[in-house]
Image (cartoon, rainbow, N blue to C red):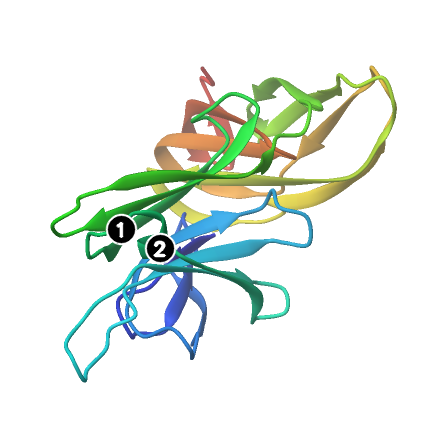
Amino acid sequence: MIYCKNWEDPCYVVNPTTGAIIDQFNFGIVKSTSGLAYDNRTPGGPFLWIFDQDYNKIDNSYGAKIYQYNLTAKAFTAVIHDMEADFPPYDHMAGGLFFTADFVPGTITLGALSQGVSNTMVCYEIGITEERQIQIVSIEGGFGAKTTVKNIMTQPLTNIPWTVYVSGGLILKTTGMNGVISSLAAGEQTSIKTGLILGIGHITISVNVGYETKTVTGFLFGPFILGIK
């Protein structure tokens, strides 16, 4: 899902395939949101990190505060951080925000960009990455999309979430695009399969299993996916 918000507007949850608005909600305490970052790595999540300009109407001043929001509880946690305190004496105004495990190998990073005079980018270490657990061996077409995955750990894995996103072409209908692998023994493989994907045209298929992602392209002809590569 895509989470998007502008200033004091509600936060919208958008289907990345269709663009349809699935949900919307208000944050309440934040005053002028400039950046959002989705966090599905930190224990207790998933979370949204919110970068807020903390606008003060009395003296027309701005700030750069980072908040953590629990998406399951739909409530703020006690985690609040003022970026301005880290980089005096400049005045900072919140800008963009990103969350990644690719900036520093083995580290989960929250990156924030401050606008204005300082034009500062800072990266905060949020945690360390889990050892890679799942390998996406292959993605095949046919009726729907079939993905083969392997447990590359030395112990069994349980409750592994998976999601398939399809974009491009003319998509008329999709079913069975997500699920959970209840258990997978060490070194074993299994297959996950979508339901109906109906439409026509060149498409992109992105498969997320646990923290692993793989993307392929193909051609959708009615309910059949052809030419996966």
Position of 112 with respect to 29 (left or right) is: left
Q: Find residue 81 and report its horizontal and vertical position in percent.
A: 44, 58
- The quarter of the picture where residue 7 lies is bottom left
Residue located at (42% from left, 76% from top): 26
Tell me residue 141's x, y (percent).
Answer: 55, 24
Q: Amino acid at mark 2?
A: Ala
Give the spatial CA distance, label 1 vs label 2.
Answer: 6 Å
Element assignment for label 2: helix
Q: Position of residue 190 (x, y in %)?
A: 77, 24
Marks 1 and 2 in Cβ contact (< 8 Å): yes
- Residue 191 % position (x, y): 73, 26
Residue depicted at 36% across the width and 74% down the height: 10
Q: Looking at the picture, which amino acid does disc 1 mark? A: Pro
Q: Is residue 119 left or right of residue 205?
A: left
Residue 144 visible: no
Residue 88, labelled with which disc? 1
Q: Is residue 59 left or right of residue 147?
A: left
Pointer 1: residues within 10 angstroms few (<14), some, or many (20+)?
few
Q: From where the camera sits, is residue 97 visible? A: yes
Q: Which mark is residue 30?
A: none
Up-down relation of residue 162 to residue 5 (above or below): above
In which quadrant will I find the C terminus?
top left
Image point 46% across, 55% down: which residue? 49
Q: Is 71 placed left or right of 1 in the picture?
A: right
Check the image and report above or below for 196 versus 33. Answer: above
Residue that carries the numbered disc 2 in the rendered image: 85
Instruction: Identify the secondary structure beneath mark 1.
Output: loop
Q: Residue at x 19, y 52 (%)?
A: 90
